[in-house]
Amino acid sequence: MKKVYKGLDLTQVHIVKGILEAQGIKAKVEDDQLLGLVGGVGYTEAIVWIFDDARYEEALATVKEYEDKLTSMNKGEKWTCSVCNEVLDEQFTMCWNCNSSRLRCKS
């Protein structure tokens, strides 16, 4: 098993796990229950582990792509849906035209 992601935001941690599993990379979240119990005092982060060490580089690339998209979403930039090419304002996380998720789009 190899660690590919860690974070304090449990939603983001579980999203990363879900994205990896959607690509066929079996993943596990560790310490997510403890984070809520401790309330962040003296405890750090929940961790996403993958089971197949041979897919480690692929998993890291997937996590980086996800983090890059989150960063661009938080910059307040317009984005273009990669499915239907609709240009949307920064506040939208889904394409109003085809209902595609912004996280799945290229820009």
Image (cartoon, grey):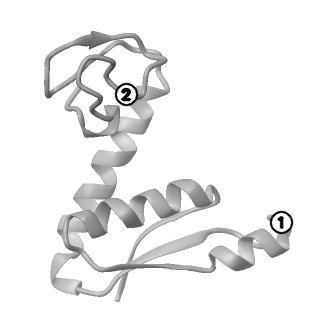
Question: What amino acid does circle 2 point to?
Answer: Met
Q: Which mark is residue 69?
A: none
Label 1 belongs to which residue? 39
Relative image position of residue 36 (x, y in whole percent): 77, 69
Looking at the image, is 36 positioned above or below residue 12?
below
Disc nearer the start of the sequence (1/2): 1
Residue at x-position 20% and y-position 65%: 23
Residue appearing at x 69%, y 77% in the figure:
33
For the residue pair 58 and 91, the one nearer the viewer reads as: 91
Amino acid carrying mark 1 in the image = Gly
Instruction: Give the residue drawn at x 33%, y 18%.
Output: 96
Decide: marks 1, 2 in contact (CB < 8 A)?
no
Secondary structure at badge 2 equals: loop
- Judge from the rendering whether residue 69 lies leftward or rightward of residue 87; answer left or right: right
Q: Which residue is mark 2?
A: 94
Residue 62 found in image quarter: bottom left
